[in-house]
Image (cartoon, grey):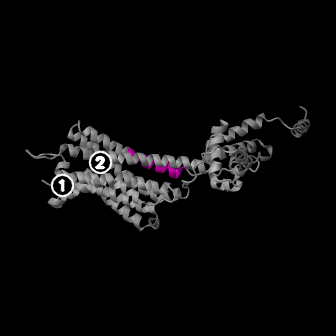
Amino acid sequence: MKSYIFNIHDVVLLMTAAESILLALLQAAMPAQTRLYGRLLSLFLVVIATVAAATLILWNDQIYLGHTIDRYWIPYLLIFALMLKGPALFLYIAAITRPRFTLKPTYLAHLAPGIVSVGVMALFGIDGHDMRHIWTMGQNSPEAQVALLWDAAKLVPLIYALAAVILVQRYFAKLKDEYSHFSNTEPRWLHILTMGFLISWAWSLVVHIIAKYASEETADYLGIADNYLTFILINALFTYSLLYAHQLLSTRTEETRAPSEAVPSDLAIERVRQAMEEEKVFLRANLNIEQFSSMIDYPVKDVSSVINKHFGTNFFEFVNSYRVEEAKQLLTDPAHADKTILDILLESGFNSKSAFHRFFKRLAGMPPSEYRKQHSQAAPKSVDERSVEKRSTDALPTP
């Protein structure tokens, strides 16, 4: 009877490890690798590969690399990698959402959970058999310490994934404070990916808790699902890095643009209002808060303070509300009756159909085409229009 080294679930772990290494090498060979975020992505992929490979070796009795390696090096490596995958993901997200991000010596503190865990294993002499809960009769088993290690290995990555999700949400909020238009695609996909890892690692923690009370077979099946999800997420993350990460970097926010704590002056408020209502600077597509501040010759912090505190909104909403009002005037102006909706949105400062329709419907309560139709019908006819209609009626033959 044949004995198989790998089952289908082992193959998924093997594929995850192999593909993560290949993707890390491919990332290293790309020109973007000169950027810090590329190196951090490679680090994260290597960590995931280490987790998958070490998990496979630890739990597969058919693989033998040597007594010392199997009993000590593999479990030590697995625990350290499990503790490192959360910080690696968080630092990657930070690198593509924060301007001028650099690795500082203080970031070495993120290695503390892994170092402490390995230290606990060494202190209590925990080996591979202990991590698998395999103890012999009469052995003084470190059951409490092993349980604590596995608890920490599931909880620490989850905390970092939650921090990464919060980081993406804050980034998205800052974009609205600084840009009148930006693509939602890149931040949305980044949010989906970080949420994916958060869900995956939360599921891993849930499975770990259920395994303490459920049967071994049930725990195995639940744990296997996590391996499949990780494989999918790794492919999605690398695809995102190839297609969208460089576009995300072009619209990163500036950390120094926090609004001033002081109450905005009347002069600053009036200058902002004048620029919008009289000079109509909002007609400039892709306007950001730095450009706007330069136009009115006011510091960015002061302008941000006026918009946030006096007008009670962010730059994104502020500018686009003026654009919607401009569009409403153009839609009801007889001189622009021959222009399409696309012409109107471009002339009012928008450069995205989806953003225009979304804002217009929210602020006007109806789509732009319906708004034009209703207000064109309700508009009173001019004297010239009535004269033309009368002459046209008189010219009709009498029945």
Pick the front one: 228 or 209 = 209
CB atoms at circles 2 and 1 under 8 Å apart?
no
Q: CA distance from mark 2 to mark 1?
A: 30 Å
Q: Position of residue 326 (x, y in %)?
A: 72, 45
Judge whether residue 288 can be spotted in this image.
Answer: no
Q: Quadrant of the C terminus?
A: top right
* Residue 86 left/right relative to 188: left
Vertical relation: 315 (above or below) 378 = below
Magenta-span inclusion, residue 191: yes
Residue sticking out furthest to the front: 262
Q: Residue at x 66, y 50 (%)?
A: 350
Query: Please, what is the dominant secondary structure of the magenta stretch?
Result: helix
Q: Residue at x 48, y 59 (%)?
A: 101
Q: Position of residue 282 (x, y in %)?
A: 69, 50
Q: Give the residue at mark 2.
A: 153
- Residue 384's disc is none
Magenta-span inclusion, residue 308: no
Task: Give the mark nearest the N terminus, 2 or 1.
Answer: 1
- Residue 4's disc is 1
Pick the front one: 150 or 221 = 150
Q: Which residues are magenta?
A: 184-198
Mark 1 lies on a secondary structure that is loop
